[in-house]
Image: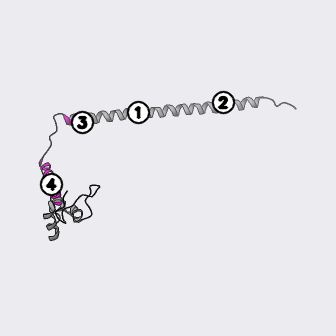
Amino acid sequence: MRSDGPDVLEPAPGGDVPDTPCRALSIDLAGVVDGSSRLDRSERRHVERCLRCQAELAQYRKLLRAMQALRKETATPAPGLLGEVLAAVEAAGERQAVRSVITGRRVAYFSGIAAATAAGAAGAIVLAARSRKGRLPLAG
């Protein structure tokens, strides 16, 4: 690129705009387009002479027009779409309910097995203790 003056910038090796009035103005240019901010006299002069800032301003204007056009557009759903969505939500809810029932049963089964095992172990201990009581100690 050719530099025609102090306001026309060459990109830095990384492609970034060097720390200049363009970088400071780039933050304000979006506000200028939507009316939320104003440029002072020197900033306006810079934008009038700087092709980079003019291009950025044009992009913001184009973006604002596109956003305003979207605001006026309304999307109409395809016929039957609402029913399909509700059916999918209902099916997902039913699957979740089935999963929770199955998971709850698993917990009950495992709890029952654990309780039966504990009862069996306790019964074995009681039987072992009773059988020892019935024996006579050996005389020695």
Question: How far is disc 3 from disc 1 in space, using C-alphas?
Answer: 25 Å
Viewer-side label of 3, 1: 3
Question: How far is disc 2 from disc 1 in space, using C-alphas?
Answer: 34 Å
What element does badge 2 sit on? helix
Q: Is residue 74 magenta?
A: yes
Q: Locate residue 137 relative to residue 25 in the image: left or right.
A: right
Quarter placement of the N terminus: bottom left
Q: Which residue is mark 2?
A: 124
State yes or no: discs 4 and 3 in contact (Cβ < 8 Å): no
Q: What residue is at 23 percent from the left and 33 percent from the top?
A: 84
Q: Earlier in the sequence, mark 2 or mark 1?
A: 1
Query: What amino acid type is highlighted by mark number 3?
Result: Val
Q: Is residue 13 magenta?
A: no
Question: How far is disc 2 from disc 3 in space, using C-alphas?
Answer: 58 Å
Q: Which residue is mark 3?
A: 85
Viewer-side label of 4, 3: 4
Query: What amino acid type is highlighted by mark number 1?
Result: Val
Crowdedness near tag 1: few (<14), some (14–19) or many (≥20) residues, C-alpha within 10 Å: few
Query: What amino acid type is highlighted by mark number 2?
Result: Ala
Q: Earlier in the sequence, mark 2 or mark 3?
A: 3
Viewer-side label of 4, 1: 4
The answer to whether 53 is drawn above or below residue 113 in the figure is below
Give the numbered dot on residue 101.
1
Q: What residue is at 32 percent from the left and 36 percent from the top?
A: 93
Crowdedness near tag 4: few (<14), some (14–19) or many (≥20) residues, C-alpha within 10 Å: some
Give the numbered dot on residue 64.
4
Crowdedness near tag 3: few (<14), some (14–19) or many (≥20) residues, C-alpha within 10 Å: few
In-front residue for pair 25/87: 25
In-front residue for pair 89/14: 14
Tell me where the magenta segment starts and ends, as one range.
53-82
Query: What amino acid type is highlighted by mark number 4?
Result: Leu
Q: Earlier in the sequence, mark 2 or mark 4?
A: 4
